[in-house]
Amino acid sequence: MLNDRIKIKEAPSRVGDKVVIFGWVEDKRIVGGVAFLTVRDPTGVIQLTVKRDVNKDLFMKAGAIPRQSTIKAGGIVRKYGETYEIVPNFIHVLSIAKHPLPIDPTGRTDTSLHKLIQNRPLSLRIPAINAIFRLRALTKQVIREFFIEKGFIEVDTPKIIATATEGGANLFEVDYFGKPAYLAQSPQLYKEQLTMGFDGVFEIAQFYRAEKSHTRKHLTEFTSVDLEVAYADYNDVMKILEELIKYIFTEIPKRGAKELEILNYKPPQPPTEIPRITYNDAIDIIRRRGVDIKWGSDIDGEALDKLAEEYPGFYYIIDWPWDSKPFYIRRKGDLSESFDLMMGKLELSSGGTREHRYEHLRRNLKEKQLNVESFEYHTRFYKYGMPPHAGFGLGLDRLMTIITGRENIREVVLYPRDPETVAP
Ligand code: AMO
């Protein structure tokens, strides 16, 4: 079927050749005795021109094809003013589109985000939406490239687990043959364990949080880019994350130039250096800007607005209070060897040095009021030569909103899951 196919973007280099294209009819006009079909595929758009005088049957057929129907057409490529056209000698309708359509897939009419998501396959025919998901695929490719180049090993950890990793809240319970099990909130404990045998591991996968958050930055199923590195501390992994951010924001504008042009959007420049602000300094800045914030509390809402006024780009908040971080993070008095990577008001990533000493890890669990024994399946490996290690988790969906300039996380996820939506 695909033997002679060219992608529509290749047409300009094939003027005078007989070619075959596959695509959908985006638009149709009959002017006098000429039928003009605008045909699109994911790479571009071209016009098919059929004259009644030249081929009456084909003219009648072309005029009767409903918009959005999928076709195969073959003919000669010609230059047509500033653009290109194909003068077809055949058009096969492969699949007819029934009208009315649930959305307008040309993108010319405003359609609600909800409707676009509900009709995702059709909405992918809107060039801007198609571009977002091409950029998403490109971003994953670029991230993989970066990690592989550094010698890190890509791993796959289980998504059905027996205990919580990020604390007991926000867990989706599943009935595992009559026993309770949970959907993984992150690969945290597994990725740490794997540093026993690998110098560094990474995973790009979906994770699950039963958070009833109705925001533009939370999903119940999100994609996390996780890294864990042996013999490293949080300074080392902050450096790696900084390099990764620079690499992404250098490569995407180059390799995704066409898609960004369709979106009419320029992502932020790659940072030369990502500043590090301690939690204590962040609190001072926020207080100086007139918001009364208690030491130890999370930085969100108005407090975060104030901080982002001073740091609108990428920055790290480091050395968080120990009480605000999970048990696996290494303690440093009242503080912890931890960091969040921010982009203005949006948290993109968090990470830290891990506690790799068996007794200290058990103590941490106790302090967080977690059941030490139920974590023994994990902590026991820390008795057998667990190397010091550090890592981070980077929210891919949130990162994509920054790369594509979208407001809502649902715009950069094909089939987003939030507290209201599990289907389609
Ligand atoms: P944390 O819980 O901060 O850390 O998650 C890491 C990053 O994942 C993204 N994220 C989400 N994105 C969309 N919807 C959600 N519900 C959601 N929850 C988290 C955010 C966040 O910064 N195990 C640690 C990471 C580590 O220390 O390696 C963790 O999961 O961008």
Image (cartoon, helix red, strand yellow):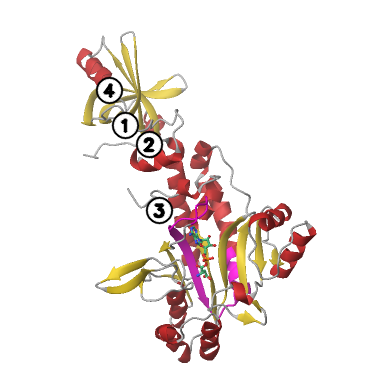
Of tags 1 and 4, the one toward the viewer is 1
Magenta stretch holds residue 26: no
Cα distance, mark 3 to mark 1?
Answer: 29 Å
Query: Disc 1 marks which residue?
Result: 24
Three-letter amino acid code at disc 4?
Pro
Q: Is residue 123 visible?
A: yes
Q: Residue at x 70, y 57 (%)?
A: 307
Of tags 3 and 1, the one toward the viewer is 3
Circle on res. 88: 4
State the SS at label 3: loop
The first of marks 4 and 3 along the sequence is 4
- Compared with 65, 169 (above or below) is below
Three-letter amino acid code at disc 2?
Arg
Looking at the rendering, the stretch of residues picked out in magenta corresponds to 213-241
Cα distance, mark 2 to mark 3?
Answer: 22 Å
Q: Do the residues under discs 1 and 2 have CB atoms within 8 angstroms?
A: yes
* 170 left or right, relative to 54: right
Three-letter amino acid code at disc 1?
Trp
Circle on res. 238: none
Q: Position of residue 414 (x, y in %)?
A: 40, 48
The first of marks 2 and 3 along the sequence is 2
Query: Disc 3 marks which residue?
Result: 417
Circle on res. 125: 2
The first of marks 4 and 2 along the sequence is 4
The first of marks 3 and 1 along the sequence is 1
